[in-house]
Amino acid sequence: MITLSDRINRLTESETLAMARKSRELKALGHDVINLSLGEPDFFTPDRIKEAAKNAIDQNYSFYTPVNGYLDLRQEISGKLKRDNGLDYDAEHIVVSTGGKQAIANTVMCLVNPGDEVIIPTPYWVSYKQIVNMADGKEIYLEAGIENNFKITPVQLENAITANTRLFMFSSPCNPTGSVYNKEELRALADVFNRYPHVYILSDEIYEHINFSGKHESIAQFPEIKDRVILVNGVSKGFAMTGWRVGYLAANAEIAKACSKLQGQFTSGTCSIAQRAALEAMQMDPEETKGMLEKFRQRRDLVLSLLKDIPGLQTNQPNGAFYLFPDVSAYFGKSDGETTIKNAPDLCMFILNKVHVALVPGDAFGSPNCLRFSYATSQDLLIEAVDRIKKALQTLK
């Protein structure tokens, strides 16, 4: 009998990856599946970035890379943070990682001791909970409901902080809700953090470039707390580079050094070719990706208009990312005569099996009344997907 560690037995499979796997299994059986479960842009990586990678191969970038990333890439990230965000970070404050997820894991593992409290607004990205779990931290959830556009208030935050609070982690623009904190809202949260110098803030900004509300705002802009902010970003979403696996963090030099030390024992440096491609991405003017942003905006508006024709769904209007997170609890307890819908996972499986559209239950994000709907695909497929969902839900009485 194989005995696995308690650590791995506590860990659960990512619900987004699980739904993607189930949809692939149905496809393999010959079904026409529309997969709206993964947060992956359907655009191709820009040509100039691909050319940079090809050139890197020809230039023999085939050796081990520095653990924290090539110096010129870290310098370019430093320049990007100054150019786009008005933030001052030197190369020593930056660690390049194999995707933003590794940057988040590095941070949590370097800051959280067993029993430390980590405050996580709900809904949250699926991996936050599991990463804190691996660090033996204690998750403290702050519910941000649809009535408040899925954003917490300063009062909620202040009431949640204790002497044992070590870290606060959130995303803006948010996965799974698409909600975006504006400067005034971040200012109010920063004022709270300023009163509690023992609390660190992990700011996940991977969807920075998919923001329909204007200029992206980072909580790292407030100087009184900047030294305690760990900013996480990458190239996967804004530059359609999910498979390249390049993320980074910017933080206090001591934290950055610790994260590099940890990474050196797990993966060492990120792929050399992917780093050279990321260097090109960092040099791009944000205006060069506006075409993707406008496409996402059009898709959001399309899906919102289509969902209005489905009774019982409650949605907000997200200002970023490429997700909708409707409340579907009106369908709990209903049945088509064969299947009774008890919860969001039941509804997801019902839709997948009946009309072959893959979604993700909100339980994975800490919100059991909701479903996550990714609109990172073509308008034709979105129209077809919503039509199928509507037909499936009409059978529930």
Image (cartoon, helix red, strand yellow):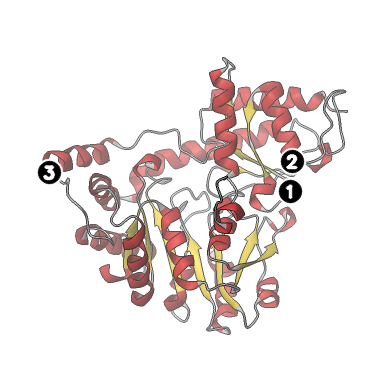
Q: Are marks 2 and 1 in contact (CB under 8 Å)?
A: yes
On residue 344, the disc is 2
Which residue lies under the disc numbered 1?
A: 368
Q: Secondary structure at mark 3?
A: loop
Q: Hey, what amino acid is under mark 3?
A: Asn
Mark 1: which amino acid?
A: Pro
Name the foreground residue: 87 vs 5.
5
Farthest residue toward the left? 59
Image position, residue 252 (x, y; %) = 37, 75
Point 30% across, 60% down: residue:
77
Q: CA distance from mark 2 to mark 1?
A: 6 Å
Q: Are marks 2 and 3 in contact (CB under 8 Å)?
A: no
Which one is earlier in the sequence, the residue at label 2 or at label 1? 2
From the top left corner, tell me how far across and down residue 335 is, in percent. 86, 29
Identity, as a three-letter code, of the amino acid under mark 2: Ala
> Of the residues under marks 3 and 1, which one precedes in the sequence?
3
Instruction: Give the vertical position of 319 relative to 16 (above or below).
Output: below
Front in this rendered view, residue 323 or 56: 56
Quarter of the image holding residue 220?
A: bottom left
Instruction: Tell me if mark 2 has few (under 14), some (14-19) or many (20+) residues whose alpha carbon lies within 10 angstroms of its own.
Output: many
Q: Is residue 222 visible?
A: no
Which of the 4 image quadrants contains residue 306?
A: top right
Quadrant in the picture for residue 16: top right
Whole-angstrom CA distance, mark 3 to mark 1, is 50 Å
Any mark on residue 60, and which?
A: 3
Q: Is residue 187 above or below residue 395?
A: below
Q: Residues within 10 Å of mark 1 (few under 14, many from 20)?
A: some
> Can residue 1 be seen at all in this image of the molecule?
yes
Viewed as shown, does residue 332 lie left or right of 25? right
Measuring 58% from the left and 38% from the top, which residue is drawn there? 18
* Secondary element at image label 2: helix
